[in-house]
Image: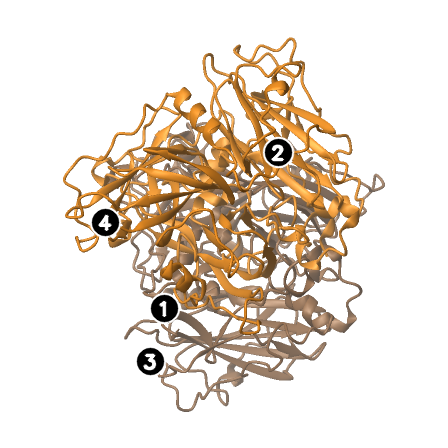
Chain colours: A orange, B brown
Amino acid sequence: MGTLLDCRRLLITSLVLAFFVSLTTPTVEAKIRLYNWEVNYKYMSPDCYQKLGIAINGKSPGPTILAQAGDTIIVNLTNGLGTENIAVHWHGIRQIGSPWSDGTEGVTQCPIVAGDTFQYKFVVDRPGTYLYHAHYGMQRETGLYGSIRVLVKDGEVEPFSYDEDRSIILNDWWHKSTYEQATGLSSIPFQWVNEPDSLLIQGRGRFNCSLMTPSSPGAGICNMTNPECYPYHLTVVAGRTYRLRIGSLTSLSALNFEIEGHNMTVVEADGNYVEPFVVKNLNIYSGETYSVLVKADQDPSRNYWAVSHVISRLPQTPPGLAIFNYYPNHPRKSPPTPPPTGPLWNDTQNRFDQSLKIKAHHNYIYTPPRTSDKQIILLNTQNRIDGITRWSLNNVSHTLPHTPYLIAVKENLKNVFDQNPPPETYDYKNFDIYATPNNSNATYGNGIYRLEFNSTVDIILQNANMISANSSETHPWHLHGHDFWVLGYGIGKFDPEKDPKNYNLVDPIMKNTVPVHKYGWTALRFIANNPGAWAFHCHIESHFFMGMGVVFAEGVEKIGKLPDSIMGCGETRG
Amino acid sequence: MGTLLDCRRLLITSLVLAFFVSLTTPTVEAKIRLYNWEVNYKYMSPDCYQKLGIAINGKSPGPTILAQAGDTIIVNLTNGLGTENIAVHWHGIRQIGSPWSDGTEGVTQCPIVAGDTFQYKFVVDRPGTYLYHAHYGMQRETGLYGSIRVLVKDGEVEPFSYDEDRSIILNDWWHKSTYEQATGLSSIPFQWVNEPDSLLIQGRGRFNCSLMTPSSPGAGICNMTNPECYPYHLTVVAGRTYRLRIGSLTSLSALNFEIEGHNMTVVEADGNYVEPFVVKNLNIYSGETYSVLVKADQDPSRNYWAVSHVISRLPQTPPGLAIFNYYPNHPRKSPPTPPPTGPLWNDTQNRFDQSLKIKAHHNYIYTPPRTSDKQIILLNTQNRIDGITRWSLNNVSHTLPHTPYLIAVKENLKNVFDQNPPPETYDYKNFDIYATPNNSNATYGNGIYRLEFNSTVDIILQNANMISANSSETHPWHLHGHDFWVLGYGIGKFDPEKDPKNYNLVDPIMKNTVPVHKYGWTALRFIANNPGAWAFHCHIESHFFMGMGVVFAEGVEKIGKLPDSIMGCGETRG
C-alpha cells in the first residue's frame, strides 16, 4: 500500500499547467484541487495515422484528476479552439449541489464559447473510478477525455488490497473528423460512421498503414514508427498485485478486455464495490468503469499482451494491443505468443451472464426501496423521420434545445422546449420486438420527464429489432446525476406483470451505466433526490446524436441562483 | 437596360428559404428584404475533390443579395453547425447606424453560437458591388460567402450603360480543413497553409485528380466528372454589353482575371464609380470588387476562356477556368484555343500601374479634406514571437479579445483589452525596409486606436522585407465601416516630408480595400464619422489570423443601447 499512500500525496506534476493547491490544515481535511486546462486542436497520431484532434494541455487523453473523497475539484477550462465550443462532462460524478457543473451542453449549460474560460467546480464525494469527456455534439470522439481517480479518505480502507494503482481508458478511433461523421449521420441518404479504424488502449493503437490505398479517405500521413503510436505498456513487478482501473469511452464499440495469461478479479464498478468475482476477460461497454485486481503471477521473463476486442458487432477493426510488461523486460518487447483472440463477438449469453454476476459487495449493500412511485418503460427503436435515420424512445427521437434545460426549468422559460412530457410507456401488448419496427410515425421531441423530488423511479429499457430485419444492438445507457440500482436483465419483451417479481432487491449493484442486451431489457431504480436536470442516454456517441436519450428534472426549485457562466446561448444570450 | 429594370423587380426566387417581403407602397419607397438562411456543413466538390465545407441553404457560394440603394436587408442567420460558431461580415456595407451588424467576431459581436439564430439588419445605402463572408477565425475559407448587388434607386442612372448584369466571385481553395490550417499557423514549427489546391470562379474549379498520390493529404474522393466541378459558364449573346461584377474573396492569392479576346472597361471599384479605362486583363486583390463592361463582340461561333491566374506569388496553382459562352454554343464546349497565360506573375510594375489608373469618375468626385488631423504610419513586418510566426504593425501583432471591442468600449469594460493605444508610427528614419527585419522584439497586443469623431485620419501602410531575405508580399488592406480616399502609392520607404506633397487630392478613388505593393507604401485618408468599432486588416485570411490588423473606434458614445444579441461571450456571458 506504500505506493498508494504516496499517490495520495502526489503533486500533479505531469502537466505544466495543472497544479495543486492545498487549502487544508496539515491533517486530513478535504482539499481543493485546482486545474488550469487549455483545450486546443492538435495533430495527433494515436494509431500512427495523423489526424487533427482535440487535446488538453497538449495531451490526449488529458491529465488524470487524482483526488480523495470529499475533495473539491476546480477546473478552469479555457477553450483555445478557434471557432468551436466545448463542454466537458464529469462522468460518474453526481454533482450533488452543483448541477450546473455537469458539463452537458443543452442540459446543464451553454457551450463554452471559443476563447472563453469556464470554471467547473464540484465535490468528488465518493471514492471510485470515473471519467471525463466532451459532452457536446460528437466531440468526445476527438480525443477530449481522461480519467478521474478518487481515493478513499485518509484512514478509510477498501474491501480489497493491492500494491499499485493504474488507470487505462479503452477507446475506438476514426480517421474521419467528427464534423464529417455528424454531417453523414444527418444526411439523406444516411451515411453511417462505419466501424472504427482502430481501437486505442490509453490513447494508443496501431493502424496498419499499408492498408491505405489512394482511394482511402484521407490517405495522409501514416507512420508506424511514430513513437506516438507505440503500444501502451503497463509495467509490473512479479509478485505484486495491481488495481487496474479500466474505463471505456468508445464511441461505438462494446469491448472485451483481456490480459494474456492473467485472471482479473472484478472489485469495483462505476464507483461501487462489487462482490468480487474472477474473469479471464471482461466485457465493458462505453461509459462503464471497472476496477480489477491483477496479480503479476506469471513467468516474469517475458511480456504479455493486453488486448481489447470488438464484441456485439461483427468486428471489422483489429484488436487494440498493449503490453503487460514484466520489469525488467523492455517495455516494447513483443510477447512471444499471439494475442488472445477473446470470446466470440456474437456470444450474447456470455455478456448477459457477466451482467448478472455483478452484485454489490456484501459489506456495501445499499438496499433499494421495495417499491417505486413511477415506472417508465422506454422502447428503443430505430426509425426514419422525414427520411433521416434516428433513434427513438417510445417513438420520440430526442433533440436538445438551444437553451439548456436546467436554466429553462429553473427560470420557467416555457418556449424553450415542449412542456408536454414524452410518453411513459409504449403499446407493449401489441408491439413485436423481433419484427422490423412498424412505428413509422416517430417524431422529434424535446419534452422531458419531471420527477417528483425524492420519489423512487423505475426505468425499464426495452431493446427491439432495428430497421433492418434480424438485427438488434447492445446499448449502454448512462444516467447523469445519480447511480441507479440494477434490478434485473432479461432477454425478450419485458412483462410488467411478471418480471418485476424477479427483481433483485437484495444485493443489486449500483451503477451509472448499464448495457441493454440485444432483444433484451434492463430494469433500473433510482431515487430522484438530486436537484437538477439530468441526461439519460445511450452512451454510443452517434446514437445519442441520433436522438437516443431523455432528460429528467427534479427538485429544480430547490436550486439557488444559477451561475451566469452557464448562460449565453439561446434565450440566455446577452 | 430592359433586363436591368427587370432585375430591379426580381423576386429572389433562386433559393427556397430566401424570400422577399415588400413593406412598401406600390411606388419607389425603400424596401425591406428579408432572408432566412441556415448555415450547415456540406460535402462539396467545387474543384472535383470532395471536402466538408460550410454552405448557406445548401449552397456555396450562398444566395446573392439583390437590393436597391436605400433598402433594408434583414438576414435571419441560423447556425446549424453542430459545435462551431459563425459570424458573417457584409463587406463594403458601411453599417451606418448599425455598427453591431458588421459581423466581425471579436470587434462588433460575439460569435453566433451553434444552434442560435442571429438577426443582421442594415441599410444598403449606396448602389454598388459588395460581398459577404464569414469573419471569424479562418472560416471564410470554408465556402461561407456570397455576393451583394445593390442597384440604383428607381429613376436614377449610372454613368455607363449595359444590357445585362452578372456577378462572379473569384476564390482560391484548399483541401485541408481550416482547422488544420489554423493549427499549423499557430504551431512551432510553423506550418504554412501552402499554395491553394485550386482557383475557383463563382465556386467552381478543377483539381487534376490524377495528380493525387497515396501520400497526398486527403487523397479521398476526387471525381472530375462530378457536375459540381463543371466550369462556370457565363452565357452571352453576340452584340450585347455585360456588366460583370467581379469580387475576389481569395484567402491568399492576388489574381489576374482575363476574358480571352475581350477587352474590359473598368467602371466601378468597391461601390464607387471609376473614370472608365480599358484593360485586357484585371489585377484584383482579395476583398476588392470591380464592375467591368464587356461587349460580346467576338466571333460568336465559339466559346472563350475566362481565366484567373495567381500573381504576385510564384504560381503553383493551375489557372481558374470558366467559359465565356456565346449563345447558342453548348456552355461546356471547350474553346478551340488554349487559355490566355496572363501577365508575368512577378510584374510588379504592371500591378502598380493599374493601381494608379483607378481614379474617381469625373462626375462622382468626392473631394477629400485638404489636410488630416492625424497620421498613422503602419509598418507591416513579419516576426517571430515566442517562436510563433506572426505579422505585426509597428511591432505589435494584433490579437482579438474575447469580449468584442464595440461592447467593451461602449460599456467601458477596461479589462477587456489594453487601454494603451498601439504606436502611431515606427522609427522610419532608421528602419531599412529592404533588410530582413531587426525588430525581433515584437509583442502581441490588443490595444486600439481611438479616433476623434469626425476627424480626418491618414493611414500610411508601409511594406517591408519578410523574415526571409529578398522577399516582400502584396497585402490587400480592408477597412470596415468606411470608404477611404486612396491618396497615393509608392515603391520604397514612405517619406512623411516629401511624399504627401504628391498626394492626389483632385480625383482620388474611394475604396474599402487597397493593395500595398511589395516594398511599397499606400496612403489613405478617411473621415472618422461612423460611430462604431471597426477592423482594418490585411484581407489575406492567414495574415489577419497571424496578427495583421488594427482596430479603430470613434463616436461610440453616440451609439444607443447595443442589442443583447451581440453579447454572450467573454465578459458579456450570462
Tell me the CA gap for discs 2 and 1. 43 Å
Q: Is residue A286 above or below residue B30?
A: above
Between disc 4 and disc 1, the foreground one is: 4
Amino acid type at image mark 3: Tyr
Q: Earlier in the sequence, mark 2 or mark 1?
A: 2
Tell me the CA gap for discs 3 and 2. 51 Å
Between disc 3 and disc 4, the foreground one is: 4
Between disc 1 and disc 3, the foreground one is: 3
Return the residue at label 1.
B349
Q: Secondary structure at mark 2?
A: loop
Q: Indicate the chain on which mark 4 is placed.
A: A
Taking the image as drawn, is residue B191 in sight?
yes
Return the residue at label 4.
A325
Q: Earlier in the sequence, mark 1 or mark 3?
A: 1
Between disc 2 and disc 4, the foreground one is: 4
Label 1 crowd (10 A; few <14 / some 14-19 / many >=20): few
Amino acid type at image mark 1: Gln
Q: Secondary structure at mark 1?
A: helix
Using the image as rendered, state which of residue A33 and residue A410 is in the foreground: A33
Image quarter in which the N terminus of chain A is found:
bottom left
Return the residue at label 3.
B434
Where residue B79 sits, quadrant-wise, is top right
